[in-house]
Image (cartoon, grey):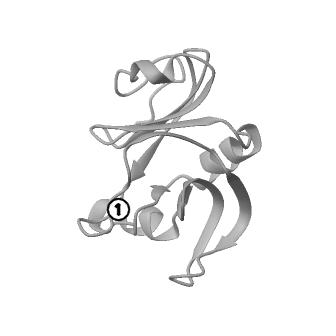
Amino acid sequence: MSPTPSSPVAPPDRRCLKGRVLCVSKRSNTLAWMVNGQVRSTMDVRFGAQYTPTREGTFRISLKSRRHVSSIYHTPMPYAMFFSGGQAIHFSPDFAAHGYRGASHGCVNVRDKSKIATLFQQAKVGDKVVIYK
């Protein structure tokens, strides 16, 4: 069942409580879109594999690309929001089809296309991204 917008799945990191933040918990495998401490939406996510881990820390969205294709892996990355080098938050057809059996090459994969499409419209270049355990 999807969490309600008023209660995040994981307690948010303190860095997520001010401003516009994509708050990503590795412990609960969730992304909470938060504005001034209020959860606007939540979605399931998965992360990079052992040898291609998703970085943890505080970042900013540096680039948004609606129909991005990876120049390294030649795979679609729809609704990509880049936050650290080539790492991005984006929709993953593989995650949608196979769940947690797979992993990314470091990106934060989202399985719900409708939710990531809405988030892509609302998030802006410069919005904060916090990834924590």
| Foreground pick, 58 / 4 | 58
Disc 1 secondary structure class: loop
Vertical position of residue 94 compared to residue 87: above or below? below
Q: State the image coordinates of residue 31 (x, y, percent, origin top left).
A: 47, 39
Vertical position of residue 86 compared to residue 37: above or below? below
Q: Residue at horizontal 34%, vertical 66%?
A: 103
State the residue position of label 1: 48
Q: State the image coordinates of residue 81 (x, y, percent, origin top left).
A: 63, 53
User: In the rendered view of the protein, which quadrant contains the C terminus?
Assistant: top left
Q: Residue at horizontal 74%, vertical 40%?
A: 124
Vertical position of residue 119 compared to residue 97: above or below? above
**97 relative to 53 in the view: left or right:** right
**46 relative to 22 in the view: left or right:** left
Give the class, few, some or many, for how many residues have Cα within 10 Å of label 1's Cα (few <14, many ≥20): some
Q: State the image coordinates of residue 116 (x, y, percent, origin top left).
A: 62, 49
Q: Examine the image and state in which quarter residue 57 appears.
A: top left
Task: Look at label 1 and name its amino acid.
Answer: Gly
Identify the residue at the far left of this view: 50
Q: Residue at horizontal 57%, vertical 84%?
A: 74
User: In the rendered view of the protein, which quadrant contains the N terminus?
Assistant: top left
